[in-house]
Amino acid sequence: MKGVVTLTGGADSQAAKSAAQDLAGQVEGVVLIKNELTVAADGTEARQDANTATASGEVREAMDEAGDGIDDAWITSKVKSQLLADTAVKGTQINVDTKANVVTLTGTAESAVAKDAAVRIAAGTGA
């Protein structure tokens, strides 16, 4: 069905899960969001299972073998959802771009504290 988004994978908190849903809802054409994100701490077996289950084909196999493989879209989505969930950061004012696992943040931070929080979130995401 057109306009249906299913969110799967892992989220650090209920707030991050909700932020991901809010972010998906901002996309033009989305009419329904199925939020199936699993709330589990990073590094736990439940989180690894949730994240691995969302990958496809060769990516899933490589992740199983390497244990830490991540793609750019996953990193971008995770950083965006964490920025939206963080009260010190106005996530909607910060654009996130990831290329070859390198995250670039652009936009406006309301303060040095917000900037530092955004950088800390981006640096802590991924591998």
Image: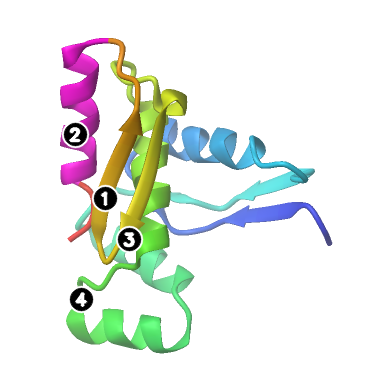
Task: Give the residue pinned by disc 2.
Answer: 119
- Disc 1 + disc 2, Cβ < 8 Å: no
Q: Is label 1 in a helix, a strand or a loop?
A: strand
Q: Amino acid at mark 1?
A: Val
**Residue at x 38%, y 51% (from the top left corner):** 76
Secondary structure character of the magenta stretch overall: helix
Which is more N-terminal, label 3 or label 4? 3
- Distance of mark 1 from mark 2, alpha carbons? 10 Å
Name the N-terminal-most of marks 4 and 2.
4
Quarter of the image where one finds residue 87:
top left
Image coordinates for residue 7, horizontal then vertical, percent? 56, 54
Looking at the image, tell me whether mark 1 or mark 3 is earlier in sequence order: 3
Q: Nearer the viewer, residue 108 or 77?
A: 108
Quick one: label 3 or label 2, which is nearer the N terminus? 3
The Cα atoms of the two marked residues, 4 and 2, are separated by: 25 Å
Q: Nearer the viewer, mark 4 or mark 1?
A: 1
Instruction: Please tell me the numbered disc located at residue 52.
Output: none
**Residue 123 occupies quadrant:** top left
- Label at residue 46: 3
Give the residue furthest to the right: 1
Q: Which residues are magenta?
A: 111-124
Residue where numbered disc 4 is placed: 67
Label 4 – label 1 distance at C-alpha: 20 Å
